[in-house]
Image: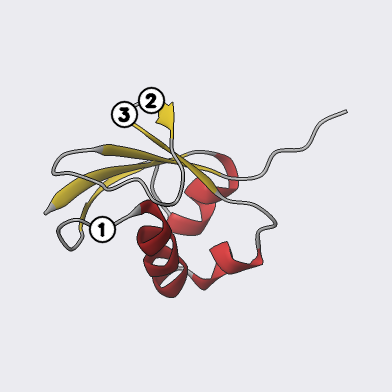
Amino acid sequence: MEIKLVAYGIAREIIGHSEMKMKVVDKITIGEFKKSIVGQYPEFGRLRDLRFAINEDYQNDDFVLTTNDEVVVIPPVSGG
């Protein structure tokens, strides 16, 4: 199936695009997707925390993706 991956900040720098279509296996969970994206882009493995929003809502690692979901990579942010 295909999803739309959206990335901001350091995530965009790692991927090299702000948006892209990705093919993933059917019924993949966020946790499995996270492992897959770290495999494709090892720099993500160095980040302290990596979260995902699916169709504008934060989801846990057990959430199952469906075709055409918009997956936003939320890298760690710092501020003060």
Residue that numbered label 1 is attached to: 28
**Which labelled disc corresponds to residue 55?**
3
Q: Say if mark 2 contacts mark 3, CB within 8 Å.
A: yes
Q: Distance between the residues labelled 2 and 1?
A: 18 Å
Residue 2, percent from left and from top? 14, 50
Residues at discs 2 and 1 in contact (Cβ within 8 Å): no
Instruction: From the image, tell me which residue sits under label 2.
Output: 56
Looking at the rendered structure, the secondary structure element under dot 3 is loop
Q: Position of residue 30 (x, y in %)?
A: 38, 52
* Quadrant placement of the C terminus: top right
Please name the amino acid that badge 1 sits on.
Ile
Image quadrant in which you'd find residue 71:
top left
In the displayed structure, 24 sits above or below 5; it is below
| Residue beneath the point at 77% across and 37% down | 78
- Label 1 CA crowd tier, 10 Å (few <14, some 14–19, many 20+): some
Type of amino acid under label 2: Glu
Residue visible at 14% across and 58% down? 26
Nearer the observer: mark 1 or 3; the answer is: 1
Which amino acid type corresponds to the residue marked 3 in the rendered image?
Asn
